[in-house]
Structures are given as C-alpha cells and as structure tokens.
Amino acid sequence: MNPEKIRADFSIFSEHRDLIYMDSASTSLTPEPVLDAILEYYRSYNANVGRGVHRLSQIASAKYENAHSTVAKFINAGSGVIVFTKNTTEGINTVASGIKWQKGDKIITSILEHHSNLLPWLRLRKIGVEVEIINPETNGILDPADFEAAITDRTKLVALTHASNAIGTIQPIEKIARICKDRGVLVLVDGAQSVPHLKVDVEASGLDFLCFSGHKMLGPTGTGILWMREPVIEPLFLGGGMIEEVTLEHYEFAGGYERFEGGTPNIGGAIGLARACEYLEEVGMDEVRSHEERLTGQLIDGLREIERVEVYGDPDPEKRVGTVSFNIDGLNPHDVAHILDESSNIMVRSGHHCASPLMAYMHIDGSVRASLYLYNTEDEVETLLATVERITKVM
Amino acid sequence: MIEEITVIRMTDGESSEAVEEVVEEMPLALYVNGRWVQTAMISPSMIKEFVIGHLFAEKVVKACDEIESIQIEENIAKVLLKDPLGIVNLKKVVLSGCGGGSSFLDESKLPRINTEFTIDWRMASESMSRVLGSEIHRRTRGVHSVGLFNKEGEIVIADDIGRHNALDKVIGYAIGENIDFKETFVGVTGRISSDMVLKCVAVEIPIILSKGAVTSLAVEIGKITGMTIIGFVSQHGMRIYTGRIS
C-alpha cells in the first residue's frame, strides 16, 4: 500500500497542506472517487428510485440496488438483507424497536458500548426487559465465558461492539456469536469501528445483525447499514416505497430491503457508500489492516515511552484497531486536543467519546483519542508523539 | 423449458386425448441504461447468458467491464452499463425472417478472423452428433440447439426456440467462463444464415457448422471475414463452403 498515492485521492490534504487528520473514528475523510460517484448521481441521473418507469429512474434504481449488492459483498453477506440507514445508531434502534419484546426478556451487552449500542437497550427496561452489562478484562477485552454465564432461558439478544470506539480493543465476536447460536440467542454487533478497518465476514462470524456507518469508512455522512441474517423484525418507518399493497383496511409490507427503507432513501449517499466499499477493496482490506497495525504499534510504543502518559486498552496492535486513547497526567483531554491542533495541526477527539459509562468504569473523565486510517503516515505519528512529549515538558 | 399440455391427437381419423410435451416460450424485454432496446421471444433457460451473449454478439459491448449490472425480473432484463448515459442506438436491420432475428452489425466494418485454429472432419461430425443429442431437442422437436466446443470437446450446449438465441446463450456462457473464442467452434441444428455468421464473427469464433443448409450471404460474409462455414454435417460427410478443415 502506498499512502502517498492514497493521499492524492483526498483533496482535503491539498486544501490544508499541514493537516494531520487523526479523527477517523469520528468521521473519515472522503476520497475523490466517492465524491465523483455521489456527484455523478446528482449531475447525470438524478431521479427517485423504485417509483418511476422513466430512464433516469431506471438508472438510479439499478445503481441503488447495485449499491446494496456491493455492500453485501464487502461484508461477505451471501444471504440476508442489507438495509441502508442513516447511520449505525439508526440500525441499532431499528432492531431495538423491531423485536417483539416481552416482559422478562433479557438483553446482554457490555460496558464498552457507545451510547448508540446502550441507550436503545436501557430504554427497554421501562417495559420490563432485563439488561445485563458485562465488564471487560483489564486489557479492555470481553471474556466470552462471561456471556456464556450470563445467558438465561429468557435471553433474547446479545448486543456488543466489535471494536471499542473509546479504547480501540477488538472483541471476540466470533466466539460470543458461537455461544449465542448454541443457546438460541440472537447476536447484534456494532461494527462502526471495525468494518472500516478490517475484513468483517458476517457468514464466518455467525452474526444475526451487523450495523455500521458509511461516514467512518470513506463514505458520506448520513449513510449506514443494517444487515440482518433474517428480517425477523418489524420495520421502524412506515410509508412510501415499503409496501406491497395498501387499502384503508389492510396493508402488506414489501419484501427484501424495501420493507425497512420507508420513504425516499439517501440515494446519492448509498451510491457513495458503495463506491467507498469498492475503493477499500481496490486498496485491499488486508493492506489497510496491516498499515494501521504498523502505525498503531508505532503510536502506542511511542506514547508509552513518554512520562505522564497513560494509554488505555490492550497495547498489542493485533488486538485493537488504530483508535488509541490516552491521557497526560494532570491535563484535561480537551486542552491537549486543542494544543495538538493549534501547535501541530493534528485533529484528534477528546472527551467521553459517547461512552460515559465506560469512562466512569475506568475512573476517568475522558481521554484524548487519536484514530488512524489508511491515509495516515509514520511521519504524522512521529509528529503527534513529538508534540505530546513537548506538551508533557512545558505543561 | 418444457410444459405438458393436453392435446387431441388424430390418428387415421380417430381422435383421442393425450398429454404432449411442448417447449416453453417467453418474451424478454431488454432494457439498456433504462431504455427499451428490444423484446426477444426466448426459451426460459440461461437468461442471463442470453443477455450477455446478445450484448456481445450485437456489439453493444466489447468487454465485460463495460457492464455494471444485469437484473433479471421475470420478463425483463435490465442492463446497466458502466457509462449509464451511453445510448444504445441500434440500427435494426432484419436480416433473416425466421424468428424475426435482427442484427445491428455494419458489414463494411466486419472484423477478420485471425486464428490458425482448425478442426478435422471427425471432430466436426462428432460435435454435430452431440448437439443433436440434446435431450430437450429430442423430446420436443421444438428447439434449436447450439453447442460451443474446443479441441477438448464440449464447453456448453444451449437450447432455445430460436437458433440465434441459442447461439447468444453459448456466447454469454463462454464470456462468463472467460473462454478464448479464437480456439472454439460452434455446431448448430438450424440453417447457417448471415446473422448467425455475423454473431460468430463479432466474438471471433472462427468456425460454424450445421447439419442444415447455408445461405449465400452467410458464405459471402464467411469469405470476407475468413470464417470457416460447414453445412450438411452428418456422420457420412459435410460440405465446406468457406475456409478449411485439417
């Protein structure tokens, strides 16, 4: 993989010559081929999908349908349903709202979760659903045995993240999914932080639901995916485009993804997300992964050598994605993030990372989070390390 | 491909009810980039192969990467090209009345067959027997069959109510399998007319043979392009109209 060649596809680096973008876990940058695909839709065949017989609608419909197949191929979804959503949050909420819960049902999730994969389940406590929270080992990785022990006859769903958005650790989803399958429990995985960075195979992993966002994987904002092995849930949105027939007395939902995509979808966004999948495949997900592993190792090793710096989560790059959280003793993470921008044009995230319960569990108020992607370089990591070291010396 | 229907059979003036096998026929409307291009009457098998083969044989596309997707929905095939605004403006010249086959090839721009590939008479004869042995052909007597072969033997045999369609199907299949047409030949059950030859020329199949007759225009095109055309192939002999066998 040639990072310089890849960086040439991202115009933002021409607009901001000194930009060091390390906030891809929040949202990634967008390469020109993805922008071209989105603009081509608006410029050349702008039309609604599935509703018209005219040729522009036919082209847009075919492109939109192909976008589903492209994303399916990206996660090796040979079967099941690919639903375009607004983001991961919408995907998880669609499942949380779509399952027919009964009082006494149980959900198991973890303290590592982003609020998006926590609040939709916690709200179900109001209707009598039990929600059990599993804590990770000290390295920030969940133990499948804890899930095995927590599952009861009333457990309906296990919902967990594949990679922590706050500390980057990769979770053993395959092992947990196998336990769930043996016990007849559905498993939902939040892939927002994993699908962009490593090859996720829904068939091999044995998942039932996978949710992820387009904007974290070189696609546009406002795009996400909910993949379901079986469309066993009720649709969240009812309206146009998702019905087979409607009378005042009766309505019947359409099959396939249409059932879950009520209303005009984000057509250009979906086409852009599909192009992002193709772009990542052209680069090669194995290449992306090994590049990020190398940079992550460099970053963590460097940070751990700096006095007063604490890095969270397992330090082994093979057990995490390139999302690295750290703190400098005595300094507020927001101040550190601000200085990194002001002094070295480095964009990082700071705060609780929408994972407040995890921050409380770790007894911290927040952290600085540098998140790497395929366009980051070793020189950029060195600049970050040098800047952090300088901060520790002067403040 | 085959449907059973009840018929009244007349034998020596006596009528009786009987169940007969007939070959199925369906319309397939072909859309390219959202525009209707044509409707073909075909047999319901190898539909995607038919569409791919038809696009290549009629020179709508020259390479697989020009096609973004093909969706088959009952009686409609929707093709999206990589250039979604490209207009497929086909000059429909009806070259052969049988089955209403049409072709859009400009004869003045005919390519030349450029291969040393030849077959011997035994290979021609045996291949023809294999094509005639098609089960559906044997059971219904209502289809044409086309086989694509190379030196190793059969690549694929397709049946259809139209011989042009069957030829498109084997071409489409071979494209999917990344077969080099320059090392292949086709055997067909029907007449070798100009449009059959033109389809072969479009993808550079160098040899066509049939148990049936050959038309004068087919021979003319064969001479211009360097294609080998062999008619009336049987176990006992054949007639070589253009080209050569080894």
Image: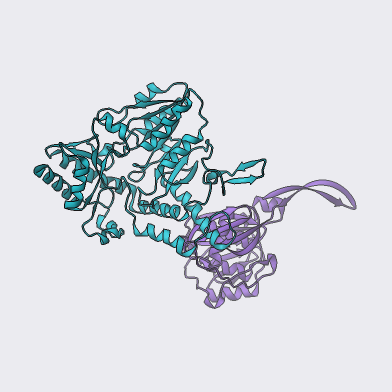
Farthest right residue? B13
Please name the residue shown 63% across and 64% down the image: B237
| Front residue of this view, candidates A160 and B89 | A160
| Front residue of this view, candidates A126 and A231 | A126
Q: Position of residue A17 (x, y in %)?
A: 22, 60
Q: How many numbered discs, if any?
A: 0
Q: Is residue B23 above or below residue A210?
A: below
Farthest bottom residue? B108
Q: Is residue B85 above or below residue A328?
A: below
Quadrant (top left, top right, bottom left, bottom right) of the C terminus of chain A = top left
| Front residue of this view, candidates A336 and A233 | A336
Q: Position of residue B241 (x, y in %)?
A: 60, 72
The answer to whether residue A4 is left or right of residue A79 is: left
Instruction: Identify the hue of chain A.
Output: cyan
Instruction: Identify the hue of chain B.
Output: purple
The answer to whether residue B227 is left or right of residue A281 is: right
Q: Position of residue B229 (x, y in %)?
A: 59, 69
The answer to whether residue A235 is left or right of residue A329 is: right
Please name the residue shown 39% across and 22% down the image: A150
- Is residue B171 in view? no
Q: Position of residue B140 (x, y in %)?
A: 71, 52
- Is residue A112 in view? yes
Which image quadrant is residue B48 in? bottom right
Q: Is residue B194 above or below residue A287?
A: below
